[in-house]
Amino acid sequence: MDEPVVKRPKRWRIIWSLTQKDWLNFLQHPTSWLSVFIPLFISLVVRFIFPTFADEAVLRIAVYAPNPSVLVQNLQQVEGVELLSVASETAVTNTILEDADGGFVLPVGWETAVSHQQAPPLTIYLSERADNEQRAALQNVLREQIWQLQAQPFPAELTWETLPATSETSPDMTIPQYFFVFLSLLSMSMVGLTLLPQMMVEEKETAALYPLLTSPASLTDYLIAKGLVGLMVSGGLLALLVLIYEGWQGDWGITAVSYLLGMHFFIGAGLLLGLRVVSRQRSQAIGGILILLLNTPGMFAILSPERFEKGPAKLISWIPTHYVVNLLASGATANGRSVWLSLLVVSICVVLLFAIVGWEARKRPYS
């Protein structure tokens, strides 16, 4: 009589079952929530208890008008606009390079030409440091005020010119954008380097790992399930941060790619840590050190990239997450900087991490 043949479950069912088990374990352990949702708590404190950080930035416009001007007087009355009257044409450019969002030099007789419907030219300078939203707001304000001088379709011929932001001391992003970048990095690192190793070490300490691996599940299935849980938790946290800080503004495509690569980087690091350590105390100690180290670039994200090209700050550029921060900052501010180097470096780091995880898994199948 033939023995009954036990049909092996499909691999995706095995992985999904392990994922469900890990997800339930996460929900049933409030201590995991505390460590993971620390970034969310900080973001809520910053956003709602200190609302001034989340207010829209005031538009700073540098103006040189040699004669009294109705346009300048009207701009001074516009809410949300800070007019910086300077003493020369050169001062307009210098002010924009330092900290203004834009500016212009008003030629002598320009308003008279507008009143005679001659459509005189006017060059308006924009700072490269300003994001797309700030530029659009500045353009709308100036168009509206110029149109009020002479209500016709084209009262003046406007030319827009972008000036590069060369000041190393001026911030490359607003305070809300800085917290968005910093807390995004912190969220991914907390999930990858705290939650995943803790779950894996707990199963080692309770002797639950060996029965799992003697079931139809393999160690690869086990690691994939852990990674999926990490993606779910990280994705949920990052989605909340996007809602809180309006992270869809700027270049959302770069933001999405930076999230995807960042999550995989920290999940790979967390899986490697979980495979190597065998005690919860050691996991927490090593994870805490790595979180502090890998979040260092995020703490200085508000500085312009030029600051990392020389001096002691150059050491930060050797930390892989420096390039994750560059991607997040480029997405948040839509500053138009090239991101190909950051994409390449982070992608290589992700591939190397998962290659090491695979090698470690074959080396220690039941540890």
Image (tube, rainbow, N blue to C red):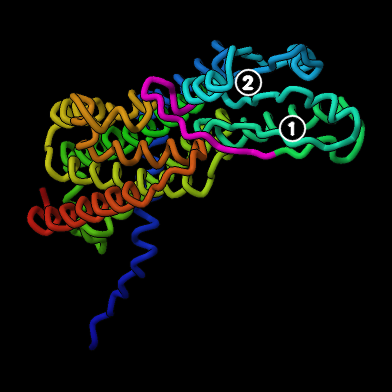
Q: Main secondary structure of the magenta part?
A: loop
Q: The residue under label 1 is which amino acid type?
A: Asn
Q: Is residue 284 left or right of residue 234?
A: left
| Highlighted range, magenta | 159-173
The one nearer the camera, 51 or 195, is 51
Q: Is residue 169 magenta?
A: yes
| Local crowd size for mark 2, using a 10 Å CA cut-off: few (<14), some (14–19), many (≥20) | many
Q: The residue under label 2 is which amino acid type?
A: Ile
Instruction: Write down the residue under mark 2.
Output: 61
Q: How many marks are shown on the rendered structure?
A: 2
Say which residue appears at 60% left-offset and 20% top-offset. Answer: 57
- Mark carried by residue 140: 1
Say which residue appears at 23% left-offset and 82% top-offset. Answer: 3
Q: Position of residue 133 (x, y in %)?
A: 62, 34
The one nearer the camera, 287 or 65, is 65
The one nearer the camera, 44 or 204, is 44
Judging from the image, what secondary structure is the residue with disc 2 in? Answer: strand
Q: Position of residue 278 (x, y in %)?
A: 12, 37
Q: Position of residue 198 (x, y in %)?
A: 25, 35
